[in-house]
Image: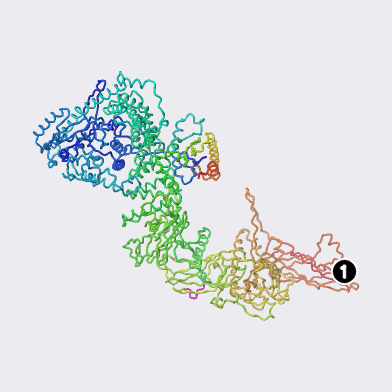
Amino acid sequence: MAVCVAVIAKENYPLYIRSVPTENELKFHYMVHTSLDVVDEKISAMGKALVDQRELYLGLLYPTEDYKVYPHTWQWLRVWGFPAVAGLCTVMPCLGLSQSPRIKSVFPNQLCSYGYVTNSKVKFVMVVDSSNTALRDNEIRSMFRKLHNSYTDVMCNPFYNPGDRIQSRAFDGMVTSMMIQVC
Amino acid sequence: MAQCVQSVQELIPDSFVPCVAALCSDEAERLTRLNHLSFAELLKPFSRLTSEVHMRDPNNQLHVIKNLKIAVSNIITQPPQPGAIRKLLNDVVSGSQPAEGLVANVITAGDYDLNISATTPWFESYRETFLQSMPASDHEFLNHYLACMLVTSSSEAEPMEQFSKLSQEQHRIQHNNDYSYPKWFIPNTLKYYVLLHDVSAGDEQRAESIYEEMKQKYGTQGCYLLKINSRTPNRASDEQIPDPWSQYLQKNSIQNQESYEDGPCTITSNKNSDSNLLSLDGLDNEVKDGLPNNFRTHPLQLDPSGDSSNSIDGPDHVKSASSLHETKKANAGIIHGACLTLTDHDRIRQFIQEFTFRGLLPHIEKTIRQLNDQLISRKGLSRSLFSATKKWFSGSKVPEKSINELKNTSGLLYPPEAPELQIRKMADLCFLVQHYDLAYSCYHTAKKDFLNDQAMLYAAGALEMAAVSAFLQPGAPRPYPAHYMDTAIQTYRDICKNMVLAERCVLLSAEILKSQSKYSEAAALLIRLTSEDSDLRSALLLEQAAHCFINMKSPMVRKYAFHMILAGHRFSKAGQKKHALRCYCQAMQVYKGKGWSLAEDHINFTIGRQSYTLRQLDNAVSAFRHILINESKQSAAQQGAFLREYLYVYKNVSQLSPDGPLPQLPLPYINSSATRVFFGHDRRPADGEKQAATHISLDQEYDSESSQQWRELEEHVVAVVNRGVLPSNFHPTEYCLNSYSDNSRFPLTVVEEPITVEVAFRNPLKVPLLLTDLSLLWKFQPKDVSGKENEVKELVKGEPEMIGTEVVSEFLINSEESKVARLKLFPHHIGELHILGVVYNLGTIQGSMTVDGIGALPGCHTGKHSLSMSVRGRQDLEIQGPRLNNTKEEKTSIKYGPDRRLDPIITEEMPLLEVFFIHFPTGLLCGEIRKAYVEFVNVSKCPLTGLKVVSKRPEFFTFGGNTAVLTPLSPSASENCSAYKTVVTDSTSVCTALISSASSVDFGIGIGSQPEVIPVPLPDTVLLPGASVQLPMWLRGPDEEGVHEINFLFYYESVKKQPKIRHRILRHTAVICTSRSLNVRATVCRSNSLEDEEGRGGNMLVFVDVENTNTSEAGVKEFHIVQVSSSSKHWKLQKSVNLSENKDAKLANREKGKFCFKAIRCKEEEVATQSSEKYTFADIIFGNEQIVSSASPCADFFYRSLSSELKKPQAQSSLHTEKQSIEDTMRLIQKCNEVDLNIVVLWKAYVVEDSKQLILEGQHHVVLRTIGKEAFSYPQKQEPPEMELLKFFRPENTTVSSRPSVEQLSNLIRTSLHYPESFSHPFHQKSLCLVPVTLLLSNCSKADVDVIVDLRHKTTSPEALEIHGSFTWLGQTQYKLHLKSQELHSLQLKACFVHTGVYNLGTPRVFAKLSDQVTVFETSQQSSMPALIIINNV
């Protein structure tokens, strides 16, 4: 299931971002932010002609391979000074090149991010723990649709100021339902 | 990947050049040393050939070599140690920093405008150094020595011998097994003999002869006479010749280990140097010349502390960097080539050319040929290898095995002379001489061989070079085989675990891909090579990858930023602080202000820390400031860390400039518009029974309604003082200035009275903040007391005799808390004060943070330091005034008015009053009278006067009238006394009233006086400094139940008139909770009996209903009505009518009692003599004590309630101004209904409280104004008016109320019949019974009235007819009378009865009209009561 869900405004600032291991929040922020490049690329690749019929779902944004083969994301995690990660990283240098399959099993950190863009250029980015292989494209798609519906509900709230951070309990609950607790 | 100075086509050939060893004799070395250069260094600037060279390939075709470069280096016998290389690379990178004034490119991508430095010179120099310092390995020959120069000086004693010695040495190094390191290309290395000749010192002839000898021995092709040092170094100053070495040696001095090889320290420190070349040469280990020896240790030696060179700790790097600077400096002072003239330069150039043409190239040509022959013979191929390889390549491809299938066979090693290596050797040679076609085919062949043999290292090498040579082939016959490179990289890294080779491969491949604009592939390659083992490499590669992202066709800005951050992190780990900072700063451009606060905070934090370590303190401070002032979403631990870092850095900054102005601190936030200023002393807490006036304090919330009330009160009292006019320059006194008050004027305050400023702090962080030594910052302009203002000196802080400043030693603001601090100033001098801001030490609290996420800066991660970790700084208070909106200009633009609440003017002394209330109750019954005391204290040094109290509720309290002096003055004496003034009476005079009278003027209720403004009866009207006066004060519980807030405003003036402040005020709000007690209703009606004892008309009956409405079961037991008094100008109670047996009327809960009193008019003469304001009081007593109702406080409250009552009708009277005549009539008619009787019911309540019985006293007032109308002691609750329908038409101007009501008219004339109650008449004697009846008519009004009395029966009702015994009036049946005002007239009538029975005599009908009025308001007077008469038969 998703480990991080983000809603990004048209101007590319976050409207909502939430992740479940909360201590790695910064990592996910960076990851989502970087994913936006790919989103932009995909949108521009689609061209203007197909705006109407275009598929909102963008598919896999970040090549999982990056993280599968070389889980170097963990290497820089040490930086950010999160105690949990710091503990993890003390292990890392001893292992040398983090190539051994042992590490992979210890840290199931093959993360993929998926993107979705609404017609108003609001982007949804979801980071999914891909060690959970049961997740298929269709499920991701339906998750996004759920997210989109919930987002629409938020926008319909007359007290919501478009462009503000989303602070809706209903939305929160929906996102929570899409996440799993990763310990 | 950033742009490079060199293109790929230049870079790769320059990276792989033929290597030539140089072996010098000592003497030769000494000659070159005169120029501060080693022999190899001497040649370096000239090692590139300026002309094209030709060479024949194995097929005898001419091949042109352009820009050939050779690398001459001194032989070293040790392979470079990896640690040393790492350090060298580190130094190279840190030595290369972006130029200061470098204009960065502006790249616009989407909404981002980024300043990015296009070039990365540090990466280029890293790459160059990295490629040069590659250790020679067995699987490739590119950097193996092809030739060896043997150099001897002509000044040697036996140069030829020296040559042979050197030759032997070379042979020994190459072929002896002791030396594994310097790798040689082929066994028979080319030896080139060079004789150095010092022109200035040596004997030219001898040199020539030696050269001749050499030519003889080694052939013309194999030797050279190089003449150098044509001048002496002393003359260097006059002639400026270019120094071509500087650009090489700047780097070389630190990176070329050869240059220091002969340093004595090196030798002594190097344990393996026993077998060193130089010691073998028999040279002494001492310094022979003036060579400056900058290094105590070998530059590439790993010093033990240097082991951790890529760990994060700073000092090592600082040291190494500083030593680097030292060497740089030292080197800068040395002029290279001081003994060389331009001719010498040409000679050296000539020498290199000669060596390459004559020596090296023929040697290479020969070697290639040999290798080719060997290969052909070995493979048994008839055709040339060239065509054969071509055929293989184009033919059926051998399916390449994937890398995973290949087992780890890197262990496989070929012997040096293995035939498989020969083709590789040939390929390398071809590559070195830029014959890329041939090289490619050879590499390709070699690759296949190696793959077949599963020799993975060799295969990877071949693949790498095959790819490179394929790319470099002129005309590009085939596309660049990127997959070769990928395979090679993967093999190097994964199978061979050789990161250095993998890195080289990546560097080359990335550069090639970049040249083909394949940025994303290049980036992927670069990223893939980042690993844990080398931070520096990872950093550089990540940075290049970031540059790749930004250079893509559609720039990927965010990826760029992300990788820059990764690079920055690795740089910092590698100790490259400056580069790290640069990377973070570049990434910051992308993240800044885009809402990614977490990331932004992180970057800011890192920038701050890096700037700090680089001593860029200002940057560090601003970066840390950024993290703290934005609403941070970081965790508490993180914020704590941020804060501590910030403080630490700040402290360092402030230590640098201790005398500078105090820095502005960003924390905590100050809500400056919420700043409140209070002038005056703090309120004293309640002291026992003493309770200070509430006045104003900062604890009170602002309430616009109440402040408006206070203002009205003040205006009121000021108007009264100024005889009803408000002075034009009047401004309400403000003691507390806040955002709601009018702050456009400079506030006035009095010297010696403290000024309290309340500053609203808010801590946005999740960690507590500790402010210490918090005080106000101010500026003061003292004013001369003599009035001369010629010198205005400005004083800022530090003169406590002018202004005292209170310092709050500790002020803690918890996480995310808003808290106010109250700071005081004590002005001791008059003048103008300007409060500028606050100054404090900002710190964190000790031990609040236990989790320390990031290794904190030294000295700030231990709890011991965190307490002392505080910095002094200031924050200004700048308050923006309200937006102006008056003129058009102000409305159209945005302008703000001034806010002067922080700029008080300190004026001369004024009196200061303090008021205390003693025994002031908090709860009262409605109408309860309680006596309390007020103490007035003048705490200033000025006498005060004109003390007044103003209140909206004057009926609540009184200071007593002029009779008040009779009561005991001290509060203690009156402990158990009644509040009233009482007189003991004898019980006989119970039912009759005791009369007294009092004038309302005595109680301050005069005509035109303002009842709300009450002057306080000070003994001498002046309160001297320090004096205090206690005055009694009576309170009466308000009639309404509930909580009452009663505002008192004390007004006083100084005896001495002050121009600026005329008066001062003191406020008090009393809160009284009242509970229900009695409810008194009273009606008055005319008594039917007209004559009383005095024989005067106008007696009235007063009915008083008293109901106990108290509901509290526990508290009040019962009420006793002790006295009912009347108070009126014209009426008085005479006696109680219903004389009950129990004298004291007791009322328990919910009981009701009824009293009936007779009231009579006061005697006319009394009324006449008394002034119109004189009231007559009549007391009817039920107990045995008379309460003197005409004295204080009973009368006071009566008058006050009266005055409040009087206000209401006055408001109505001016309603109808038209129809004056009718009005007059109306009034007249109304008047006769009016009484002005006021009833005062005095009671006692027995209350049990804490098993103690208390007696409470109180009084209720009922104002009777209209006869027959019920009046209440408490104001009736009015029904809320129903919602009216909106009317859309104009209401007709109806003349309502022009006619007085019937009821009113019927009261004009009073009638009464006087007759015997029963009359006996002997009907049997006389059939008609005549009864005399007297009809008394009295005119109640003040006007003349015409009265018509009609006795005729007009009963038309059938029942009346049926009455059996009707009677008739005899005689005149109609009378017309004229009654003067108040006149009494009696008519004698006769009634005639014929039967016995009971008759109603009340049949006469009376019509009345005002005689002087044309309009007749004729109406029958009151429907006569049944006046029954009994006629008996006798």
B1018 inside magenta stretch? yes
**Image-quadrant location for residue B812:** bottom left
**Image-quadrant location for residue B66:** top left
**Image-quadrant location for residue B995:** bottom right
Mark 1: amino acid: Val
Q: Is residue B197 left or right of residue B1203?
A: left
Q: Main secondary structure of the magenta part?
A: loop
Residue B102 seen in the current view: yes
Q: Which residues are magenta?
A: B1015-1021
* Residue B1176: percent from left, percent from top: 63, 74
Q: Is residue A105 above or below residue B1225?
A: above
Q: Which residue carries the number 1 mark? A: B1394
* Residue B466: percent from left, percent from top: 33, 27
Q: Is residue B741 left or right of residue B1072?
A: left
Q: Is residue B1261 above or below residue B595?
A: below
* Residue B185: percent from left, percent from top: 26, 31
B1090 inside magenta stretch? no
Foreground pick, A70 / B849? A70
Q: How many marks?
A: 1
> Quick one: quadrant of the C terminus of chain B?
bottom right
